[in-house]
Image (cartoon, rainbow, N blue to C red):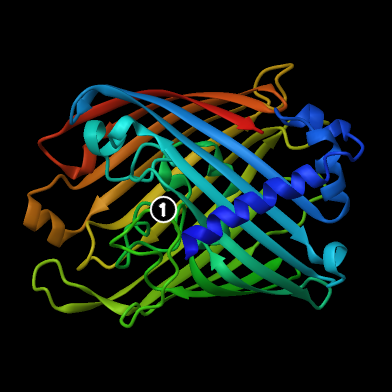
Amino acid sequence: MVKRLEWFACAGLMMANLALAGAEEAADWSKQTLTGAWGGARASLDGKGVTVDITHKSDMLSNRSGGIQTGSVWLANTEAAINMDLGKLAGWDGATAFVQYHIQHGKQGKDFNGSYVGSFAGVSNIETGTETGKFWQAWLQKSLADDAFSILAGLYTIDSEFYVTDTSGLFLQPPYGMSAEMAPTGQNGPPIFPTGALALRLKYAAHDFYLQGAVADGVPGDPNDPHGTHIQLNKGDGTLSVVELGYTPADEDKSISKTALGVWNYTAQAVDLVTGEPRPDRGFYVLAERTLMSEQGQTGQGLSGFVRYGVANKDVYQADWSGSIGLHYQGLFDGRDDDEAGIAVTTSHASEKYRLLNASDPSETVIEISYRAQMLPWMAVQPSLQRIINPNMDPALSDATVAGVRLELAL
Protein backbone atom coordinates (compact mmCIF):
# COMPACT_ATOMS: atom_id res chain seq x y z
CA MET A 1 0.00 0.00 0.00
CA VAL A 2 2.78 2.44 0.92
CA LYS A 3 4.64 1.69 -2.31
CA ARG A 4 1.51 2.56 -4.30
CA LEU A 5 1.30 5.85 -2.41
CA GLU A 6 4.90 6.57 -3.44
CA TRP A 7 4.01 6.22 -7.13
CA PHE A 8 0.84 8.31 -6.75
CA ALA A 9 2.80 11.06 -4.97
CA CYS A 10 5.48 11.16 -7.67
CA ALA A 11 2.87 11.13 -10.44
CA GLY A 12 0.91 13.89 -8.69
CA LEU A 13 3.99 16.09 -8.50
CA MET A 14 4.66 15.63 -12.21
CA MET A 15 1.03 16.47 -13.09
CA ALA A 16 1.15 19.64 -10.96
CA ASN A 17 4.29 20.76 -12.76
CA LEU A 18 2.69 20.17 -16.18
CA ALA A 19 -0.47 22.02 -15.19
CA LEU A 20 1.55 25.08 -14.26
CA ALA A 21 3.88 24.92 -17.25
CA GLY A 22 2.30 27.93 -18.90
CA ALA A 23 3.21 30.32 -16.11
CA GLU A 24 5.73 33.11 -16.57
CA GLU A 25 9.37 31.95 -16.31
CA ALA A 26 11.36 32.90 -13.20
CA ALA A 27 14.93 34.00 -13.93
CA ASP A 28 16.34 32.91 -10.57
CA TRP A 29 15.32 29.28 -11.04
CA SER A 30 16.89 29.31 -14.49
CA LYS A 31 20.23 30.39 -13.03
CA GLN A 32 20.26 28.27 -9.90
CA THR A 33 19.06 24.90 -11.22
CA LEU A 34 20.07 22.66 -14.09
CA THR A 35 16.52 22.07 -15.34
CA GLY A 36 15.56 25.75 -15.13
CA ALA A 37 12.20 27.24 -14.25
CA TRP A 38 10.09 24.46 -15.82
CA GLY A 39 8.32 26.90 -18.11
CA GLY A 40 7.33 29.13 -15.19
CA ALA A 41 5.92 26.30 -13.05
CA ARG A 42 8.48 26.80 -10.30
CA ALA A 43 7.73 30.51 -9.95
CA SER A 44 3.98 29.82 -9.93
CA LEU A 45 4.34 27.13 -7.27
CA ASP A 46 6.58 29.40 -5.19
CA GLY A 47 3.97 32.14 -5.30
CA LYS A 48 1.45 29.67 -3.87
CA GLY A 49 3.82 28.72 -1.04
CA VAL A 50 5.19 25.51 -2.57
CA THR A 51 8.93 25.04 -3.07
CA VAL A 52 10.26 22.00 -4.91
CA ASP A 53 13.96 21.13 -4.59
CA ILE A 54 15.52 18.22 -6.48
CA THR A 55 19.16 17.36 -5.88
CA HIS A 56 21.54 14.67 -7.06
CA LYS A 57 24.81 13.53 -5.52
CA SER A 58 27.27 11.09 -7.10
CA ASP A 59 30.36 9.78 -5.32
CA MET A 60 33.18 8.08 -7.18
CA LEU A 61 35.25 6.42 -4.45
CA SER A 62 38.39 4.31 -4.66
CA ASN A 63 40.17 2.45 -1.87
CA ARG A 64 43.79 2.85 -2.87
CA SER A 65 45.39 0.78 -0.12
CA GLY A 66 44.66 -1.14 3.08
CA GLY A 67 41.25 -2.08 4.39
CA ILE A 68 39.61 -5.21 2.98
CA GLN A 69 40.77 -4.85 -0.62
CA THR A 70 41.48 -2.17 -3.19
CA GLY A 71 38.70 -1.23 -5.57
CA SER A 72 36.33 1.47 -6.74
CA VAL A 73 32.57 2.04 -6.73
CA TRP A 74 30.16 4.71 -7.95
CA LEU A 75 27.43 5.70 -5.46
CA ALA A 76 24.47 7.95 -6.22
CA ASN A 77 21.55 9.49 -4.38
CA THR A 78 18.73 11.61 -5.82
CA GLU A 79 16.28 13.48 -3.60
CA ALA A 80 13.09 15.46 -4.09
CA ALA A 81 11.86 17.73 -1.29
CA ILE A 82 8.58 19.68 -1.23
CA ASN A 83 8.09 22.42 1.34
CA MET A 84 4.59 23.90 1.67
CA ASP A 85 3.71 27.15 3.43
CA LEU A 86 0.17 26.28 4.46
CA GLY A 87 -0.53 29.91 5.31
CA LYS A 88 -0.18 30.84 1.63
CA LEU A 89 -1.54 27.59 0.31
CA ALA A 90 -4.53 27.03 2.57
CA GLY A 91 -4.85 30.01 4.92
CA TRP A 92 -3.44 28.10 7.91
CA ASP A 93 -1.01 30.67 9.27
CA GLY A 94 2.12 29.41 10.98
CA ALA A 95 1.77 25.91 9.53
CA THR A 96 4.13 24.15 7.16
CA ALA A 97 4.25 20.72 5.56
CA PHE A 98 7.35 18.95 4.31
CA VAL A 99 7.82 15.80 2.20
CA GLN A 100 11.16 14.29 1.21
CA TYR A 101 11.77 11.30 -1.03
CA HIS A 102 15.10 9.76 -2.00
CA ILE A 103 16.30 7.18 -4.51
CA GLN A 104 19.52 5.30 -3.78
CA HIS A 105 21.29 3.92 -6.84
CA GLY A 106 24.76 3.16 -8.21
CA LYS A 107 26.86 0.63 -6.22
CA GLN A 108 27.09 -1.96 -9.04
CA GLY A 109 25.80 -4.51 -6.55
CA LYS A 110 28.54 -3.88 -3.98
CA ASP A 111 28.75 -1.92 -0.74
CA PHE A 112 31.85 0.23 -0.99
CA ASN A 113 32.62 0.31 2.70
CA GLY A 114 31.58 -3.31 3.35
CA SER A 115 33.41 -4.72 0.32
CA TYR A 116 36.58 -2.61 0.21
CA VAL A 117 37.27 -0.52 3.32
CA GLY A 118 35.61 -1.98 6.42
CA SER A 119 35.41 1.27 8.38
CA PHE A 120 33.26 1.39 11.54
CA ALA A 121 32.38 5.06 10.94
CA GLY A 122 31.74 4.63 7.21
CA VAL A 123 33.11 6.42 4.18
CA SER A 124 30.22 8.14 2.36
CA ASN A 125 27.10 9.70 3.87
CA ILE A 126 25.02 8.72 0.82
CA GLU A 127 25.82 5.00 1.05
CA THR A 128 22.89 3.18 2.64
CA GLY A 129 23.51 -0.49 1.88
CA THR A 130 20.36 -0.91 -0.26
CA GLU A 131 19.35 0.38 -3.67
CA THR A 132 15.81 1.61 -3.18
CA GLY A 133 13.52 4.61 -3.10
CA LYS A 134 11.58 5.74 -0.06
CA PHE A 135 9.91 8.61 1.74
CA TRP A 136 12.05 9.42 4.72
CA GLN A 137 10.36 12.60 5.91
CA ALA A 138 6.70 13.65 5.68
CA TRP A 139 5.50 15.91 8.48
CA LEU A 140 3.33 18.85 9.53
CA GLN A 141 4.58 21.67 11.76
CA LYS A 142 2.65 24.43 13.52
CA SER A 143 4.34 27.48 15.03
CA LEU A 144 2.79 29.35 17.95
CA ALA A 145 3.56 32.29 20.29
CA ASP A 146 5.19 34.43 17.58
CA ASP A 147 7.21 31.43 16.37
CA ALA A 148 8.80 30.86 19.79
CA PHE A 149 7.08 27.47 20.11
CA SER A 150 6.55 24.82 17.44
CA ILE A 151 5.09 21.33 17.31
CA LEU A 152 5.89 18.84 14.55
CA ALA A 153 4.33 15.45 13.85
CA GLY A 154 4.79 12.83 11.15
CA LEU A 155 7.55 10.84 9.48
CA TYR A 156 10.71 12.43 10.82
CA THR A 157 14.48 12.01 11.14
CA ILE A 158 16.15 13.20 14.33
CA ASP A 159 19.41 14.11 12.58
CA SER A 160 17.55 16.89 10.78
CA GLU A 161 17.51 18.90 14.06
CA PHE A 162 19.28 16.99 16.84
CA TYR A 163 23.04 16.45 17.25
CA VAL A 164 23.63 18.83 14.32
CA THR A 165 26.58 21.12 13.55
CA ASP A 166 26.31 23.04 10.28
CA THR A 167 30.08 23.46 10.09
CA SER A 168 30.60 19.70 9.76
CA GLY A 169 28.13 19.39 6.87
CA LEU A 170 30.90 19.79 4.29
CA PHE A 171 32.41 16.36 4.88
CA LEU A 172 31.55 13.10 3.11
CA GLN A 173 32.03 10.76 6.06
CA PRO A 174 28.82 9.78 7.93
CA PRO A 175 29.85 10.75 11.51
CA TYR A 176 29.72 14.46 10.64
CA GLY A 177 25.97 14.02 10.30
CA MET A 178 24.78 11.49 12.87
CA SER A 179 27.68 10.57 15.14
CA ALA A 180 29.47 7.23 15.02
CA GLU A 181 28.47 6.10 18.52
CA MET A 182 24.74 6.84 18.23
CA ALA A 183 24.14 5.72 14.63
CA PRO A 184 24.23 1.95 15.44
CA THR A 185 21.95 2.16 18.49
CA GLY A 186 18.51 0.58 18.85
CA GLN A 187 17.15 -2.44 17.02
CA ASN A 188 17.34 -0.85 13.55
CA GLY A 189 19.27 2.32 14.24
CA PRO A 190 17.69 5.64 15.21
CA PRO A 191 15.45 7.46 12.68
CA ILE A 192 18.16 9.07 10.56
CA PHE A 193 18.90 9.16 6.82
CA PRO A 194 17.68 7.22 4.92
CA THR A 195 14.85 5.90 7.13
CA GLY A 196 12.51 8.07 9.17
CA ALA A 197 10.03 7.09 11.86
CA LEU A 198 6.72 8.38 13.15
CA ALA A 199 7.57 11.04 15.71
CA LEU A 200 6.37 14.03 17.69
CA ARG A 201 8.80 16.95 18.19
CA LEU A 202 8.33 20.03 20.40
CA LYS A 203 10.63 23.07 20.36
CA TYR A 204 10.78 26.32 22.33
CA ALA A 205 13.27 29.09 21.52
CA ALA A 206 13.75 32.42 23.33
CA HIS A 207 16.60 34.73 24.41
CA ASP A 208 19.21 32.85 22.32
CA PHE A 209 18.38 29.53 24.01
CA TYR A 210 16.31 26.64 22.67
CA LEU A 211 14.94 23.47 24.19
CA GLN A 212 13.67 20.71 21.92
CA GLY A 213 12.49 17.19 22.49
CA ALA A 214 11.27 14.35 20.28
CA VAL A 215 9.61 10.99 20.83
CA ALA A 216 9.88 8.55 17.91
CA ASP A 217 9.08 4.94 17.09
CA GLY A 218 11.97 2.90 18.49
CA VAL A 219 12.34 0.77 15.32
CA PRO A 220 12.25 2.86 12.12
CA GLY A 221 11.09 1.13 8.95
CA ASP A 222 11.09 -2.67 8.66
CA PRO A 223 14.33 -4.40 9.76
CA ASN A 224 13.40 -7.38 7.56
CA ASP A 225 12.76 -5.34 4.41
CA PRO A 226 14.93 -2.28 3.69
CA HIS A 227 13.27 -1.67 0.31
CA GLY A 228 10.62 1.04 0.02
CA THR A 229 8.76 2.95 2.71
CA HIS A 230 7.52 1.07 5.77
CA ILE A 231 5.61 2.64 8.64
CA GLN A 232 4.68 0.22 11.37
CA LEU A 233 4.24 0.30 15.13
CA ASN A 234 4.91 -3.21 16.35
CA LYS A 235 4.65 -4.54 19.87
CA GLY A 236 8.03 -4.35 21.54
CA ASP A 237 9.37 -1.55 19.34
CA GLY A 238 9.30 0.90 22.22
CA THR A 239 10.21 4.53 21.66
CA LEU A 240 13.30 6.68 21.29
CA SER A 241 13.30 9.97 23.21
CA VAL A 242 15.80 12.76 22.57
CA VAL A 243 16.09 16.09 24.41
CA GLU A 244 18.51 18.86 23.48
CA LEU A 245 19.26 22.20 25.17
CA GLY A 246 21.19 24.69 23.09
CA TYR A 247 22.57 28.22 23.07
CA THR A 248 22.74 30.08 19.75
CA PRO A 249 23.42 33.79 20.32
CA ALA A 250 22.31 36.06 17.49
CA ASP A 251 25.06 37.97 15.69
CA GLU A 252 24.64 40.82 13.22
CA ASP A 253 27.51 39.60 11.02
CA LYS A 254 25.97 36.10 10.91
CA SER A 255 28.87 34.46 12.73
CA ILE A 256 28.37 30.82 13.69
CA SER A 257 27.93 30.18 17.40
CA LYS A 258 26.21 27.14 18.88
CA THR A 259 26.63 25.07 22.03
CA ALA A 260 24.32 22.17 22.87
CA LEU A 261 23.86 19.25 25.24
CA GLY A 262 21.61 16.30 24.47
CA VAL A 263 20.43 13.05 26.06
CA TRP A 264 18.66 10.09 24.44
CA ASN A 265 16.94 6.92 25.65
CA TYR A 266 15.19 3.87 24.18
CA THR A 267 12.40 2.35 26.25
CA ALA A 268 13.19 -1.07 24.80
CA GLN A 269 16.24 -2.50 26.52
CA ALA A 270 19.39 -3.64 24.73
CA VAL A 271 21.42 -6.82 25.30
CA ASP A 272 24.74 -7.09 27.12
CA LEU A 273 27.55 -8.12 24.74
CA VAL A 274 28.95 -10.69 27.19
CA THR A 275 26.12 -11.94 29.42
CA GLY A 276 23.15 -11.44 27.10
CA GLU A 277 21.23 -9.79 29.92
CA PRO A 278 18.99 -6.76 29.27
CA ARG A 279 20.67 -3.37 29.68
CA PRO A 280 19.48 0.26 29.49
CA ASP A 281 19.91 1.78 26.04
CA ARG A 282 20.78 5.43 26.49
CA GLY A 283 23.49 8.02 25.99
CA PHE A 284 24.35 11.71 25.85
CA TYR A 285 26.27 14.18 23.68
CA VAL A 286 27.77 17.66 23.70
CA LEU A 287 28.70 19.83 20.74
CA ALA A 288 29.94 23.29 19.89
CA GLU A 289 30.75 25.25 16.76
CA ARG A 290 32.13 28.76 16.32
CA THR A 291 33.28 31.26 13.75
CA LEU A 292 36.99 31.55 14.51
CA MET A 293 37.92 34.21 11.97
CA SER A 294 35.78 36.30 9.61
CA GLU A 295 36.97 37.94 6.42
CA GLN A 296 36.46 41.67 6.72
CA GLY A 297 33.43 42.90 4.80
CA GLN A 298 32.55 39.38 3.58
CA THR A 299 29.50 37.94 5.34
CA GLY A 300 29.77 34.21 5.88
CA GLN A 301 33.36 33.92 4.68
CA GLY A 302 36.19 32.84 6.94
CA LEU A 303 37.27 30.08 9.28
CA SER A 304 34.94 28.13 11.58
CA GLY A 305 35.38 25.04 13.72
CA PHE A 306 33.36 22.37 15.49
CA VAL A 307 33.78 19.76 18.21
CA ARG A 308 31.39 16.89 19.08
CA TYR A 309 31.49 14.15 21.72
CA GLY A 310 28.96 11.44 22.53
CA VAL A 311 28.60 8.36 24.76
CA ALA A 312 26.61 5.12 24.34
CA ASN A 313 26.21 2.14 26.70
CA LYS A 314 29.61 0.46 27.15
CA ASP A 315 28.00 -2.92 27.90
CA VAL A 316 25.99 -3.03 24.66
CA TYR A 317 27.79 -1.45 21.71
CA GLN A 318 31.04 -1.76 19.80
CA ALA A 319 31.84 1.92 20.42
CA ASP A 320 31.15 3.37 23.86
CA TRP A 321 32.13 6.90 22.79
CA SER A 322 33.19 8.90 19.78
CA GLY A 323 34.58 12.38 19.33
CA SER A 324 35.00 14.64 16.31
CA ILE A 325 36.81 17.89 15.65
CA GLY A 326 37.19 19.89 12.45
CA LEU A 327 37.91 23.15 10.67
CA HIS A 328 35.97 24.68 7.80
CA TYR A 329 36.91 27.65 5.61
CA GLN A 330 34.61 29.34 3.13
CA GLY A 331 36.20 31.56 0.47
CA LEU A 332 39.76 30.39 1.05
CA PHE A 333 40.95 31.68 -2.36
CA ASP A 334 40.31 35.09 -3.90
CA GLY A 335 37.50 35.00 -6.43
CA ARG A 336 36.18 31.67 -5.07
CA ASP A 337 33.81 33.06 -2.43
CA ASP A 338 31.42 30.08 -2.43
CA ASP A 339 34.08 27.36 -2.28
CA GLU A 340 34.55 25.44 0.99
CA ALA A 341 37.62 23.69 2.35
CA GLY A 342 37.96 21.58 5.48
CA ILE A 343 39.77 18.99 7.54
CA ALA A 344 38.14 16.81 10.20
CA VAL A 345 39.05 13.92 12.50
CA THR A 346 36.78 11.38 14.24
CA THR A 347 37.82 8.78 16.80
CA SER A 348 35.51 5.91 17.78
CA HIS A 349 36.54 4.11 20.96
CA ALA A 350 35.98 0.36 21.33
CA SER A 351 34.14 -0.65 24.50
CA GLU A 352 35.94 -2.92 26.95
CA LYS A 353 33.55 -5.83 26.41
CA TYR A 354 33.82 -5.55 22.62
CA ARG A 355 37.62 -5.59 22.88
CA LEU A 356 37.44 -8.64 25.14
CA LEU A 357 35.20 -10.57 22.74
CA ASN A 358 37.00 -9.60 19.53
CA ALA A 359 40.61 -8.94 20.57
CA SER A 360 40.12 -5.64 18.77
CA ASP A 361 42.18 -2.49 18.48
CA PRO A 362 41.24 0.11 21.09
CA SER A 363 39.82 2.59 18.55
CA GLU A 364 39.34 3.65 14.95
CA THR A 365 40.37 7.11 13.77
CA VAL A 366 39.32 8.61 10.44
CA ILE A 367 40.75 11.77 8.88
CA GLU A 368 39.19 13.62 5.95
CA ILE A 369 40.47 16.51 3.87
CA SER A 370 37.94 17.95 1.43
CA TYR A 371 37.42 20.88 -0.93
CA ARG A 372 34.02 21.76 -2.41
CA ALA A 373 34.29 23.89 -5.54
CA GLN A 374 31.10 25.68 -6.65
CA MET A 375 31.67 25.47 -10.40
CA LEU A 376 28.21 26.79 -11.37
CA PRO A 377 25.24 27.94 -9.26
CA TRP A 378 23.70 24.49 -9.79
CA MET A 379 26.86 22.32 -9.80
CA ALA A 380 29.59 21.63 -7.24
CA VAL A 381 32.57 19.27 -7.47
CA GLN A 382 34.15 18.02 -4.24
CA PRO A 383 37.38 15.99 -4.16
CA SER A 384 38.08 14.24 -0.87
CA LEU A 385 40.93 12.27 0.68
CA GLN A 386 40.35 9.99 3.68
CA ARG A 387 42.70 8.04 5.91
CA ILE A 388 41.16 5.31 8.07
CA ILE A 389 43.42 4.17 10.91
CA ASN A 390 42.56 0.76 12.46
CA PRO A 391 39.47 0.14 10.25
CA ASN A 392 36.60 -1.27 12.33
CA MET A 393 39.10 -1.68 15.20
CA ASP A 394 40.10 -4.93 13.45
CA PRO A 395 43.80 -5.85 13.86
CA ALA A 396 43.59 -7.89 10.65
CA LEU A 397 42.89 -4.79 8.55
CA SER A 398 45.68 -2.39 7.69
CA ASP A 399 45.12 1.36 7.54
CA ALA A 400 43.13 2.40 4.46
CA THR A 401 43.46 5.36 2.11
CA VAL A 402 40.36 6.40 0.18
CA ALA A 403 40.33 8.97 -2.62
CA GLY A 404 37.09 10.22 -4.10
CA VAL A 405 35.15 12.99 -5.73
CA ARG A 406 31.53 14.05 -5.29
CA LEU A 407 29.40 15.70 -7.98
CA GLU A 408 26.42 17.63 -6.62
CA LEU A 409 23.65 18.99 -8.84
CA ALA A 410 20.61 21.18 -8.13
CA LEU A 411 18.06 19.97 -10.69
Number of other residues with Cα within 10 Å of mark 1, as a class: few under 14, some 14 to 19, many 20 or more = many
Q: In the rendered image, is residue 163 in sight?
A: no
Q: Which residue is mark 1?
A: 179
Q: Is residue 142 above or below residue 401?
A: below
Q: Residue at x 30, y 40 (%)?
A: 365
Q: Residue at x 87, y 62 (%)?
A: 88
328 or 120, which is in the foreground?
A: 120
The residue sitting at the top extreme is: 334
Q: Residue at x 27, y 78 (%)?
A: 269
Residue 308 locus on image (x, y percent): 46, 52
Q: Is residue 57 above or below residue 334?
A: below
Which kind of residue does numbered mark 1 sit on?
Answer: Ser
Q: Residue at x 8, y 52 (%)?
A: 358
- Is residue 277 left or right of 128 when viewed as pictured? left
Residue 372 locus on image (x, y percent): 57, 26
Residue 66 locus on image (x, y percent): 20, 25
- Is residue 271 left or right of 199 when viewed as pictured? left
- Is residue 86 left or right of 277 when viewed as pictured? right
